[in-house]
Image (cartoon, helix red, strand yellow):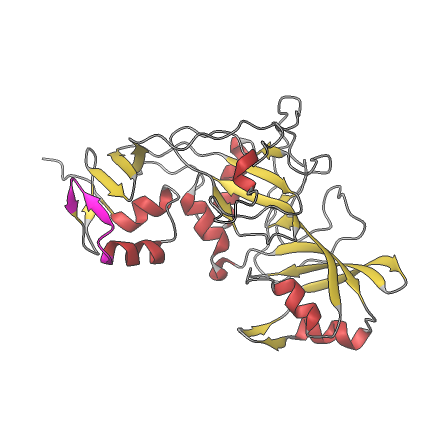
Amino acid sequence: MNERRSERLQKLLANAGEGSRRGLEKRIEAGEVQVNGQAASLGDTAGPGDQVSLGEAVYRVVDKPAFHRSIVYNKPLGEITTRNDPEGRPTVFDRLPGVKGGRWVAVGRLDINTTGLLLLTTDGELANAMMHPSNRVDREYACRVYGEVDGAMLEQLKKGVELEDGPAAFGDIVDSGGDGQNHWYHVTLLEGRNREVRRLWASQGVTVSRLKRVRYGAVHLPHRLRMGEWSELAAEDHTVLREDVGLPGNPEGQLSLRPLTPRGSRRPGGRGKLSKKSARGSAARGKRSTATSPKRSPGKSHTKKFSGKKKPEQTRSKPRKKR
């Protein structure tokens, strides 16, 4: 007789994009998760056919891996990386395409005054792995700095400075040119703390007047992707991202959650082309929309290339409705 397969609740919910495992463990302990109508306890599992509830979300456990999608979004100035904002400000989720049987999870955040690459996926396991500090997935930013910058300051920023929430440093800094006191640099980070790029420069007495993320791990911001538009990654590229953080590229025999409650409606967006070349830890590979790219930063090397599989012709996302 075959033993019934089951999986821990926090893993199932995390893979469905409901949060990190640590955060979900706290919600289980707080009594927010139910299995078949009964309050769950930390350590409980669920198997095929079970019903799992978290807040208004209701799922059925199915005996097959979920189909996942990932997209690159070029975030404009003034949008926030949250689903609902009490102040009614525009969010990045307003422009995203609809997704069946899942939800978009932002891999890291960009603050309201930062533009550029935002990677979103329906694969919660991938999102959590890419954001976890132990995987050392680097981020690259183009920043315009106002003020006098000298070599000693750059060395100090690479060596490390003490911020209010602990030590921080740039993995690399490359001069990208500029005139007068406005100068462009490309910098890399191996973590994503709140406003970390701005705070690092501020520690040296200079101000970041413009900030744009241009790469996250293996994913580059496509050269022709306009602000407010998104570009979907090919299935092969999603597999590369999983393998790059130590996850199985095509998981087999995995349980997953199928939503039983409909997600909120989302406005369809445009579908674009993916940057043909990208590599983790090396911003110098492939064509770039900005001037100079940093050297290879610390961390694991990545030798796989994205497929560059041809996508349908890019169209602009529908304009946002006035609030």
How far across and how far down the image is residue 70, in percent?
52, 37
Query: Residue 285, how many percent across, how many down?
Result: 72, 46
**Residue 154 in the image: x percent, y percent?**
75, 71
Q: How many marks?
A: 0
Which range of residues does the magenta coloring cover? 29-38
Quarter of the figure that contains the N terminus = top left
Task: Give the side of residue 226 with respect to residue 21, left or right.
Answer: right
135 in the magenta segment = no
- Residue at image position (26%, 48%) is 9
Visible residue check, residue 279: no
Q: Name the quadrant containing residue 261.
A: top left
Residue pictured at 34% horizontal, 58% vertical: 22
Return the residue found at the far top: 312
- Residue ranking furthest to the left: 1
Q: Nearer the viewer, residue 322 or 295?
A: 322
Which residue sits at x=34%, y=54%? 21
* Residue 117 located left or right of residue 32: right
Residue 30 is a magenta residue? yes
Residue 78 rendering spot, x and y as whole percentages: 64, 47
Q: Is residue 172 left or right of 122 when viewed as pictured? A: right
Q: Is residue 89 visible?
A: yes
Q: Nearer the viewer, residue 285 or 166?
A: 166
**Viewer-closest of 153 and 276:** 153
Compared across the picture, whether 180 is left or right of 289 comes to right
Name the quadrant containing residue 150. Answer: bottom right
